[in-house]
């Protein structure tokens, strides 16, 4: 965190006028963790919520990765000044890298960046109240189009994975002043049949119990039971149009 050096007279002036005694620039927002939503894809903005320390994302569904950032305000405010010291976020500035991977060439990586797939702003709006207020903000950390580009470059006839590391900074506004978070890095393993569990061809037998996956996105951070037709016994690739998640079950 960077703090501004303020002379004693400046401190007194800030206290009299704004009631803010914490840095309101870099580090005014503290990103704590990736929150796990409940069965309705809702959160409560509470420090006791369950969290993910590492993500998983399945290539077969082609969805992006949803991040739920738990954020705490590092801004302090005197009584009566809370509204002026409330942060309203505008989004997260995201950069994605693939450490140690040779899946994409340097030229392809440059194209992904200029196409705003590995370097972009993911917009979301959330209020974060001062004096230690905690809020949860939902935003797309990995775009679906990037996942589809990875799938197109991958050999889906066998199991394979790639590690993506997304680093982001959340940006907000506080009474016309820009407020940012510290950089936060989060790793996501992307591969085929990571969260997708194929039970057989569609439809499955009557009364088959089917898991529906993570409520916010079946492609990530959980298990979803699906049905599909594979191309052959030795080729795990899915026949186009045959995948259904959650699985279809006979009536």
Image: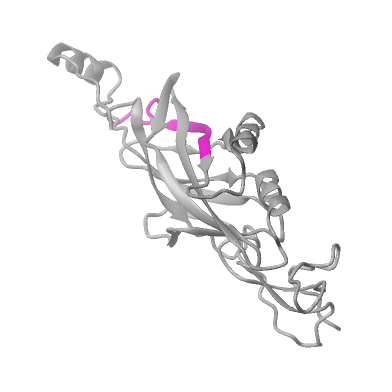
Q: How is the image coloured?
A: one colour
Quarter of the image for the C terminus: give it: bottom right
Tell which residue pokes out farthest to the left in this image: 8
The quarter of the displayed image where residue 141 is located? top right
Determine whether, in the image, residue 175 is placed left or right of residue 195: left
Bounds of the magenta segment: 78-95
Q: Is residue 137 left or right of residue 18?
A: right
The part of the image, by quadrant, that contains residue 73 is top left
Residue at (43% x, 23% y) in the render: 178
The structure residue drawn at horizontal position 60% and vertical position 67%, both measured from the top left corner, is 194
Give coordinates of residue 196: x percent, y percent: 66, 69
Relative to the observer, which residue lies in front, 28 or 100? 100
- Residue 228 vertical position relative to residue 57 in the rendered view, above or below: below
**93 magenta-colored:** yes
Query: Does residue 133 sit above or below 229 in this rendering?
Result: above
Image location of residue 123, percent across then percent down = 58, 35
Q: Is residue 59 above or below residue 159?
A: above
Which residue is rendered at x = 52% and y = 47% of the image? 98
Residue 6 in view of the camera: yes
Q: Nearer the viewer, residue 56 or 127?
A: 56
Q: Quadrant of residue 130?
A: top left
Above-or-below relation of 146 to 41: above
């Amino acid at each position: 965190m960077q703090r501004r050096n303020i002379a004693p007279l400046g401190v007194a002036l800030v206290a009299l006028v704004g009631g803010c005694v914490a840095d309101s620039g870099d580090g005014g927002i503290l990103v704590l963790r990736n929150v796990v939503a409940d069965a309705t894809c809702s959160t409560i903005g509470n420090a006791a919520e369950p969290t993910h320390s590492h993500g998983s994302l399945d290539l077969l569904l082609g969805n992006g990765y949803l991040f739920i950032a738990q954020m705490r305000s590092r801004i302090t405010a005197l009584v009566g000044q809370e509204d002026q010291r409330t942060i309203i976020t505008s989004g997260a500035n995201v950069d994605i890298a693939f450490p140690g991977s040779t899946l994409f060439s340097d030229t392809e990586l440059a194209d992904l960046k200029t196409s705003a797939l590995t370097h972009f702003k993911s917009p979301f709006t959330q209020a974060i109240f001062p004096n230690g207020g905690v809020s949860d903000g939902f935003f797309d950390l990995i775009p679906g189009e990037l996942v589809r580009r990875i799938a197109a470059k991958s050999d889906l006839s066998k199991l394979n994975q790639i590690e993506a590391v997304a680093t982001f900074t959340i940006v907000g506004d506080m009474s016309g002043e820009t407020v940012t978070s510290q950089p936060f890095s989060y790793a996501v393993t992307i591969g085929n049949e990571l969260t997708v569990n194929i039970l057989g061809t569609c439809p499955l037998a009557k009364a088959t119990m089917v898991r529906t996956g993570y409520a916010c996105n079946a492609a990530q951070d959980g298990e979803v039971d699906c049905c599909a037709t594979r191309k052959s016994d030795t080729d795990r690739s899915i026949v186009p149009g045959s995948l259904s998640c959650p699985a279809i079950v006979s009536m």
